[in-house]
Each structure stands twice: as structure tokens, then as C-alpha cells.
Image: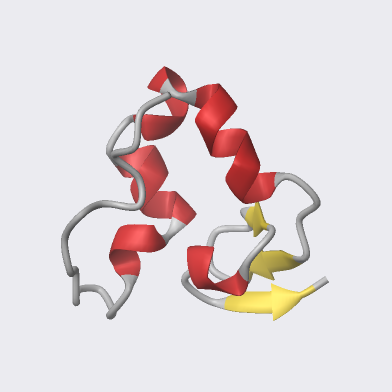
Amino acid sequence: MSNWFPLDLEITKPHPGHEAHLCMAHNTGFIEKNLEAYKKFVKDGKFVCKSCGRVAAKAENLCDPEAL
């Protein structure tokens, strides 16, 4: 299992914390190469991103989360 997500960087654009957002996981190719690792971020999803529609277990993994 790879551990390169969340990124070991501090990304401030487009907003602080973007290194831990699921859209960044998609942009870096993490999902395609590490689907089993990615599943832990979405299993039992409790939040939906109002920007991209992704679902996550924790609000901190989405850009604009709203509780389901």
C-alpha cells in the first residue's frame, strides 16, 4: 500500500489543506494506482463535496464538505 496520499506537502491553492482532499488524490493518479488504499477514505462516507460530488468518511478530505 502506498502512503503518498495525503501528500506530504502543504498546499495553499486553491485553498489550505488541499493536499488531503480526494480531488488531489485523483489529480495525482493515486486512485488509479492505489484503489484499495483509497477505499479507506470513502468507506462509510459521511460527507459529500459540494464542488465535485465526491463522498468521504471525513470532512477534511473534501474541498467543500456537507454532512450527508
- Left or right: where 20 falls relative to 22: left
Q: Quarter-wise, where is residue 12 in the image?
A: bottom left
Examine the rendering and report whether any part of residue 62 can be seen.
no
- The residue located at (38%, 60%) in the rendering is 20
Residue 3 rendering spot, x and y as whole percentages: 34, 37
Q: Position of residue 50 (x, y in %)?
A: 61, 72
The x and y percentages for residue 52 are 55, 59
Q: How many numbered discs sit on the rendered protein?
A: 0
Asked which quadrant contains residue 67, the reply is bottom right
Please say if 19 is above or below 5.
Answer: below
Give me the residue at 37% from left, 32% from top: 30
Q: Nearer the viewer, residue 63 or 43?
A: 43
State the image coordinates of residue 31 (x, y, percent, origin top left): 45, 30
Q: Is residue 44 left or right of residue 53?
A: right
Q: Is residue 30 visible?
A: yes
State the quadrant of the C terminus. Answer: bottom right
Establish if 23 lies above or below 50. above
Q: Which residue lies furthest to the top in this view?
A: 33
Q: Report the coloring of the rendering.
A: secondary structure
Q: Residue at x 53, y 76 (%)?
A: 64
The image quarter in which residue 29 lies: top left
Q: Quadrant of the N terminus?
A: top left
- Up-down: is 18 above or below 15? above
Residue at 17%, 69% (x, y): give it. 10
Drawn side of residue 19 relative to residue 64, left or right: left
